[in-house]
Amino acid sequence: MSYSAPESDILYLTSLTSSGIAGYETLEKPPLTAGAEVELSQAVESSDGEVLMKAFVSPALGIESIPAGDFDFSIYGAVSAMDGVSEIVGRLYQRTLQGVETELFNFATGEIDATTDSPTLYPVTYSTSDIIDTAITDRLVLKMYAKTDYATDITVSLYYLGETHQSRIFLPVNISKITGGDMLAALYDADYDGITTPSTDSGGGHTIQDNGTPLTQRSNLNFIGATLTDNSTDDATVVTITGGGGASSDLIEHMHTGSTDGGLLRLDTIMSPTDSISLDSSTDMHGLLPKLSGSSDDYLNGFGQWSVPAGRILLSTISTSDASADFSGIPATYNKLTIQYVARTSKAAANDCSILCTLNGDTTNANYRSRKINTYTSTINTGSEDTRRIGYLPAVSAPANSAGYGIIEIPFYANTTFYKQILGRNALRFDANNLQEQLQLFAIEWENTGAITSISISAETDDFIPGSTFRLYGEY
């Protein structure tokens, strides 16, 4: 496989072909298609500093280093007026395949003393003493700037293409040649595929690429452990690799004219993955998502680990006008359960009504040992009994629009060693007397070691009225 382009170390500033980068013109090697002269003009004043005129970019370099040596720049320029000192500044960059640009050096033409009716050549030489390491996919970028020390606008012009004012770069003459062609071989043809005249050798005309990027071209391509078929109908060489690849063989094809699915390996055709974590993402690099934890309460933290968030999670909200609010199917994944409520009952001819807390459907009061403290007016009352009572709510005779508010807490609800403790506190307005606001505390031991999976909050008599709401939270 060989290149027929002439060995040249010149790059011309052009606008003949697309650079593939928005806003960038091209740097090209001869031979060039004839093009009309371009006068690129930029107004600038001293307060502007350097003003970008245009950026020019080469295709892939195709070499692994640029040796030390002289970069000679032939820049044609002119100015609109001879006021102050105006010049063109050039900055040369190395651009990676990812678009990262690193400045190599910069230069200036010095004072431009030609007006636009007579553009003049301003030669500049920049000598480098160090080797510049490159990847074969790297490109050179030349950015040209206008600059003046004059306080008001001066128009600085750069000229390229045409027949008489061809601005260009002469690269170091001792650049190493790559096998089959010289530096920047991919620049010699219009489609940048690295070949201008296909070889007449058997099997010629192929370009071996890595994800679309041409590799260093060699005379031979050797497949080991593969079956090769010459497909003259599709003008393709089909390479079939069987076993060990983890993909169906019909997708592992190398067709120089392209395949019907674009040569893409589809995820749903790959065999089931393993449980390896070697490709998981980390704080050092991108990677795969870790295996899912199977818990709806987990989240993926910044270290790539499934974690339980701190704090409280709302599990369920019940708004009801029935006799009870029933929570069931409670998971055993939290440290504590909390119920918040606002409610009122329809119990007739009464100021208040008891509310009951039933665990796992156990309605036997003898299994619940209760202690209460409540205060209203100047009185503090205490008492104990076997009951599920966990608070009181206003009833029909209580002041209109008054509701009871309360909190019920059950820590260690999923523990299977000890009996469960229920803590309740609530407040309500008993009657129209402003002294009848009641504050109540309740504690209940449920004599059962089983994990709590359901909770029912019910009115001891009649129903809750519309607007009564109960919220169950799980807390970590």
Image: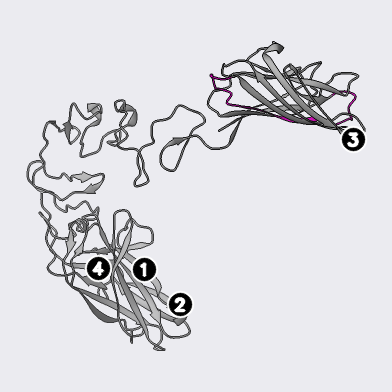
Please identify the dominant SS of the magenta region.
loop
Check disc 1 and report the residue beneath it: 54
Residue 396 on the magenta span: yes
The image quadrant of residue 291 is top left
Tag 1 or tag 3, which sits nearer the N-term?
1
SS category of the residue bearing label 2: helix
Which residue has dot 3 on it?
435
Separation (CA) of disc 3 from disc 1: 84 Å
In this orientation, does residue 37 appear? no
Query: Judging from the image, what secondary structure is the residue with disc 1 in?
Result: strand
Disc nearest the viewer among 1 and 2: 2
The answer to whether mark 2 and mark 3 are in CB contact below 8 A is: no
Q: Where is residue 236 in the image (x, y as percent from the top left)?
A: 18, 36
Residue picked out by circle 4: 12
Mark found first going from the N terminus, 2 or 3:
2
Please give the name of the residue rendered at 42% of the width and 30% of the height, measured from the top-left corner.
292
Is residue 124 something one can see in this rendering? yes
Viewer-nearest residue: 210 or 29: 210
